[in-house]
Amino acid sequence: MPTASRDVVISNKLGLHARPAMQFVELANQFSSRVQVQSLAGENVCADGKSIMQMMILAAVEGTPLRIVAEGPDAEPAVEKLAALINDKFGEE
Amino acid sequence: MEIKKGIGVSPGVAISTAVVLDAEDLAIPRRPVDPKDVEREVERFRDAIKRSLEQLRELRTAVTSRYGKEIGGIFDFHTGIISDTSLHEPVISTIRAQHVTAEYAVSVIIRRYASNFQAMSDKYLSDRVKDIYDIERRILHNLVGQKAESLSHLDHDIVVVAHDLLPSQTAALDRTHVKGFATDVGGRTSHTAIVARALGIPAVVGLGNLTAEVSGGDTVIIDGNRGVVIINPDEEQLAEHREYERRREVLEAELRELESLPAVTLDGHAVSLQANIEFPEEIDDAIKRGASGIGLYRTEFLYLASGKEPTEEDHYNAYAESVKRLGGRPLVLRTLDLGADKYTQAKALSPERNPFLGDRSIRMCLHDIPMFKRQLRAILRASVLGDVRIMFPMISTLMELRQARMILKDVEEELEDEGIPFRREIPVGMMMEVPSAAIMANQFAREVNFFSIGTNDLIQYTLAVDRTNEKVAGLFCPAHPAVLTLIRDVIRAGHRNNVSVSVCGEMAGEPLYTLLLLGLGLTVFSMNSPDIGEVKKIIRSTTLEHARQVARRVMSFDSERQVLHYLREETRKIIPEVF
């Protein structure tokens, strides 16, 4: 099973709040790969990238480093698109 | 067996199987579920999720079309959470592993997530806990709503146990199979109490945490006479209450025979016995029980049932339907009487310090003229369909009455301009429930077509007693000579000015006061329809002459104890079964 991963840093002002988190989850659900998001700040909490509840609990504010890990047939495009969404600041600014 | 003491607010005894309704905003008790019913709880949870998602979709569409995509998008987050398997899986496994209700599992899991949010240091994120609770409410509401809906089609008798019955819940009940209510909270004028009396079924309120102690399926005795609820009664208790039920049925069979007979005294004096209603559906039963019309239609239930302001068409449809069911009999529509004890306080921006003396009833209507006009338009439009009359509640000064009449005049002119037909000279009456109005009844009589004495409020305002306050409720007494003097004077002022007078408060339906009211010259009694039989029996068993003597005697007493004692003696001679 192919796996892929990317490290990103939350750079939009409000962090991974409700709307960006929803955008992330919706995008993640378009891929068949399993998507895990790990917070690299402090406790290394891990969340299911397809669950809004878990993504919110990451409490990823501006500046939080995250690792996106995908596992499945479309792992590479998944991490690429998801990392791009975060780096684009969710089209916020 | 467990005996719980509360406040009996509607008489009678019911023995039946309990259905427990959980309301929103509650700590949901952990209630065990039979292992064989576990999958049914899972199914209920799935249904509630499906329903919540449908509602959100509708809400999103409505909000988007009104306020644009940006605002509509806020519901995406709720939709995301509700469809999240990270929510579904732990709820379902909690139901299966611990054998608990879907409500309990939902609230445990959601609260666990909520505490995660609350602990976040970022203000924006920790604020999302409000959304989480909102989501919990929506799911729970759909779980409870399912049950409420299933209560609209029952195949066996039940009693309803709830924290507090919501108007939307009572409106949806299957009335033929619901035999009693018991609630954790509430007073004598609570929604539960009013509906129970209207349906003629026993109710006990103020039972503390009854919902936590009763499980669905338990046998429960609701004794509305003594204000007691017995959970899983023993044989002796069952036998005693079945005996009471039997005696009551004998009396009711006797009263049923009176249903088609006129309310006439032995010396040929006829009075009109009418019914108080909240819903048009009650009319058929009222007529069956011998009501010659509707003396009080409490229109506020249109507002309470849906929780939002009804449109003109909502009003019109309810009134038109009522007129149709009445087949020419009179219908007195009381305009909106909200405020104080009813739900407005909870919704008010700043709760009033003294709501019973505050912005309620006609005062509220005069402060919101567009709302008031919507109702008046609907009443006037319905007035061409039958004998419709308008009644303004809680009038305390002549100016209020004149203002209300002026607004009515405005609405008439608007309809005139639009070419919409309405009954000109529609009879206009007022409630006599504030002492200032009762004292000035002679002046008011020149400006209205009828008076209707609302005894509950008249007593409360005359005696300065809040009867929902258990510490002083004992002071609340219709037999207080001050109250009786006001009632006598209003009836006299009516007679003198050719204005008909009715009593539509609870006193009219209490057999204890029938002789007295008859003797004071009352000709219209409006009550909850289950009370018509007993009152009619008394009227048909006495003469006007005798009733007048009783009234004269009563008016010579100076304490309510003497009054009550004497009336009990006199009434017992006519219907010993009741006392």
Image: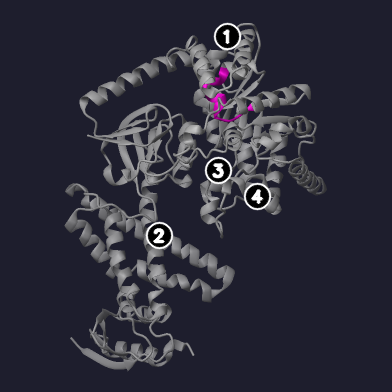
Q: Which residue is mark 1?
A: B542
Residue B151, placed above or below residue A4: above
Which sits earlier in the primary sequence, circle 3 or circle 4?
3
Q: Identify the disc placed on residue B389.
A: none
- Residue B565 visible in this rendered orientation of the protein: yes
Q: Which residue is mark 4?
A: B364
Kind of residue sitting beneath label 4: Met
Neighbourhood count class around disc 3 (C-alpha, 10 Å): few under 14, some 14–19, many 20 upward? many
At x 17%, y 49%, the residue is B35
Same chain, marks 1 and 4? Answer: yes
Q: Mark 4 belongs to which subunit?
A: B
Same chain, marks 1 and 2? Answer: yes
Asked whether the residues under the numbered discs 2 and 3 touch, taking CB atoms below 8 Å apart as contact, a structural biologist would say no
**Residue B525 in the image: x percent, y percent?**
61, 23
Kind of residue sitting beneath label 3: Phe
Label 2, secondary structure: give it. helix
Quadrant showing the N terminus of chain B: top left
Which sits earlier in the primary sequence, circle 1 or circle 3?
3
Q: Main secondary structure of the magenta part?
A: helix
Which sits earlier in the primary sequence, circle 2 or circle 4?
2
Label 4, secondary structure: give it. helix
**How far apart are the two marked residues, 2 and 4, measured between alpha carbons?**
31 Å
**How far apart are the two marked residues, 3 and 4, measured between alpha carbons?**
16 Å
Residue nearest the observer in this picture, B490 or A93: B490
Kind of residue sitting beneath label 2: Arg
Q: Which residue is mark 3?
A: B301
**How far apart are the two marked residues, 1 and 2, measured between alpha carbons?**
57 Å
**How far apart are the two marked residues, 2 and 3, measured between alpha carbons?**
23 Å
Which range is magenta?
B503-514
Q: Mark 3 belongs to which subunit?
A: B
Q: Which residue is mark 2?
A: B138
